[in-house]
Amino acid sequence: MTLAERFDTWAQQHQQKGEEKGIEKGGGLLLQRQLVRRFGALPSEITAQIAAATSVQLELWADRVLDAASLEEIFRP
């Protein structure tokens, strides 16, 4: 494999990781917006938890927004 081919492979992998991070960040921002609209201002612990979450966690919590009566219900294990 040439140096140029290795660089192209690295660049593609780096771009994919960046896209995944962008999707997670956007999902987190959307979840925060929904939570604020539904429950009011969020505690800093919740915003930190959202910022550190994986896309799988964000999807789970976003689904729970529809039925949960409290923030605690959304973030239960």
Image: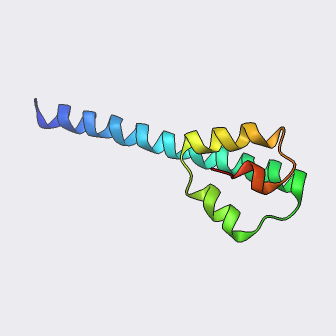
Q: Position of residue 61 (x, y in %)?
A: 69, 44
Q: Please give left or right for residue 21 compared with residue 50 in the image.
A: left
Residue in the image at 42% along x and 42% along y? 17
Res 71 quadrant in image: bottom right
Q: Is residue 65 above or below residue 8?
A: below
Residue 25 against residue 8 in the figure, above or below: below
Residue at 76% over, 68% down:
43
Depth check: 20 or 51 in front? 51
Which residue shows up at 36% across the image and 42% down it?
Answer: 14
**Count of numbered circles in the view:** 0
Task: Please give the name of the residue rendered at 50% of the width and 40% of the height, measured from the top-left corner.
Answer: 20
- Residue 19, x across and y down, in percent: 50, 40
| Residue 36 left/right relative to 19 | right
Classify the position of the N terminus by image quarter: top left
**Residue furthest out toward the bottom:** 44
The single residue placed furthest to the front in the displayed view is 77
Q: Nearer the viewer, residue 26 or 50?
A: 50
Q: Residue 47: x and y, percent?
A: 68, 62
Query: Foreground residue, 49 or 70?
Result: 70
Residue 9 in picture, x, y percent from top left: 26, 33
Comparing 69 with 10, the one in front is 69
Task: Reply above or below: 1 against 15.
Answer: above
Q: How is the image coloured?
A: rainbow
- On the rendered structure, is 77 left or right of 8? right
